[in-house]
Image: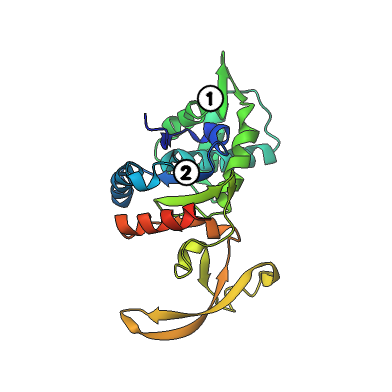
Amino acid sequence: MNKKLLHVNLLDLYDFLGSSTYEIIKISTTWCEPCKMLKKAIKKIIEKNEFKNTNFCIYEIDGDEYSIIQQHLVILNILLGKNITFPISYPLLLKLYKDIIKSENADTYILDVNEFLNYAFKYKLLKQKNEFVHLSPNIEKIKKMILFFDDFHISGYPTMIFCKNGAPISTSLDENDYYSRGFAEYDQNKFKDIDITKYNILTVELSKENNLEKKEKVKIIQLYPKCEARIVGFESENKINELLRHFFKM
């Protein structure tokens, strides 16, 4: 196993984070074509002599695992908010899951609820003893991890979060890639009900769609303050090389 590239379960990530000077958390899936391309590119890059003596590690997180755990936490929080107590019988829990998934409260895309519930056992959110289901002690640990990832708005794959000495970097890797840093175009009407004083707003020049030569000044708002550490997607192996060179000089 290459010690510079490790596939880790979400639950075990914090056991590794901070063990290398430079670390990248890479969230990807097996079905995503850009993820497959990035995986091949990274394998080539980490074998290069250029980075041989750099103390770094890339942690691969399964995006499907992350997404499923996040959906379970939404449902479990709804149950606990309704004063449902654990341990609980499996048939009753299955019924409650079905009711919540059918409701408008749960943002889920689940076809087989029985199969979906089994993932809660697989990922150690729940544990079954005899006929009853218990909350796992791991659930609070996972909640903290999900909150960490939510700072970076994991909405697309692959996503990479860059950390130094166990913490996300606070300097952007790519000053031109505004949207990868968690910025969205600022629309006063869209944000009229939100206190924007805590957000970072910039005026930048962006190329108009389908016309790279014509630029216009627009306001952008940074919705996720820690996104300097995040890059979504990638353009090429050369682009990844460039990002790593920049990162390893920080």
Q: Quadrant of residue 240?
A: bottom left
Residue 131, image x and y in percent? 56, 16
Query: Which residue is drawn at the image coordinates 47% and 27% (left, top)?
Result: 122
Query: Which residue is drawn at the image coordinates 30% and 48% (left, top)?
Result: 41
Please tell me whether residue 136 is drawn above or below residue 98 in the rendered image. above
Residue 14, image x and y in percent? 57, 36
Q: Residues within 10 Å of mark 2 (few under 14, many from 20)?
A: some
Q: Which residue is mark 1?
A: 91
The answer to whether residue 241 is seen in the rendering is yes
Q: Element under label 2?
A: helix
Q: Quadrant of residue 171?
A: bottom right
Q: Tell whether label 2 touches label 1 (CB within 8 Å).
A: no
Nearest to the observer: residue 112 or residue 171: 171
Q: Is residue 45 left or right of residue 117?
A: left
Q: Is residue 240 left or right of residue 225?
A: left
Count numbered badges in the picture: 2
Residue type, numbered disc 2: Ser
Lower position in the chain sequence, tag 1 or tag 2: 2
The answer to whether residue 105 is seen in the rendering is no
C-alpha span from label 1 to label 2: 24 Å
Q: Element under label 1?
A: helix
Nearest to the observer: residue 243 or residue 181: 243
Q: Which residue is mark 2?
A: 67
Say which of marks 1 and 2 sits in front: 2
Residue type, numbered disc 1: Pro
